[in-house]
Amino acid sequence: MLPLVSEADLVYMDPPYQGVCMGIDPRYLCGVSFRELVGVVKELSKRGIAFLLSYDGRSGNKVYGQRLPDESGLCRIELKTGRSAQATLLGRSEITYEALYLSPPLLERLRLQPHQVEEIARELTEKEHPTLIGGDEVATFR
């Protein structure tokens, strides 16, 4: 599918976290290697494809997945996604954070610098009704 995308497209990728698809689990597609994923994101960026990638994260003291290397050129933000359902089922109260990577072509399309994206991520995480500003567009999330 990825060879068919063009610069006009926006791609969202959400492969399974590393380590969550051990054994037979029909909920996850296994076999996405870290090295292969890094190669794919570098190639997409080189082709000028705008994309978002949800990949690594953490809940409590547990970290899921290896961070993508800085050389990939992606802007990484960490978003607070709320209480961990798995931890709650186990009688614990833990907050989950997921990493979202934005490609350089996406930042260019939105006319945003990495530090602006980090500010937006903080606002999304900290405020009850965050506002996203991109170029001339303003959207308030409620």
Image: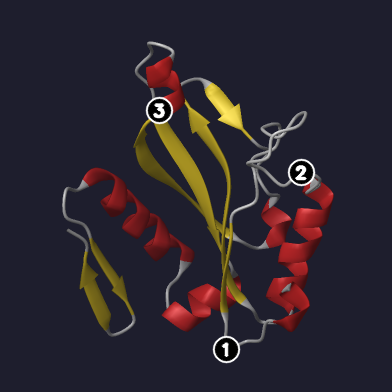
Regarding mark 3 in the picture, which secondary structure is present there? helix
**Which sits earlier in the primary sequence, circle 1 or circle 2?**
1
The residue that disc 1 covers is 8
36 w.r.t. 59: above or below? below
Q: Residue at x 45, y 70 (%)?
A: 113
**CB atoms of marks 1 and 2 within 8 Å:** no
Q: Secondary structure at mark 2?
A: loop
Residue count near mark 2 (Cα–Cα under 10 Å), binned few <14, some 14–19, many ≥20: some
How was this image coloured? Answer: secondary structure
Which label lies toward us, 1 or 2?
A: 2
Residue at the spot x=78%, y=46% of the render? 34
Quadrant for the N terminus in the image: bottom right
Which quadrant of the figure has residue 49? Answer: bottom right
In the image, residue 120 lies at what x, y percent?
A: 33, 59
* The disc label shown at residue 30, or none: 2
Q: Nearer the viewer, mark 3 or mark 1?
A: 3
Q: CA distance from mark 3 to mark 1?
A: 37 Å
Give the amino acid at mark 1.
Ala
Q: Residue at x 37, y 19 (%)?
A: 88
The residue under label 3 is which amino acid type? Ala
The tag on residue 17 is none
Mark 3 and mark 2 residues within 8 Å of each other at the beta carbon: no
Q: Amino acid at mark 2?
A: Cys
Asked whether 137 or 31 is in front, the reply is 31
Q: Earlier in the sequence, mark 3 or mark 2?
A: 2
The disc label shown at residue 85, or none: 3
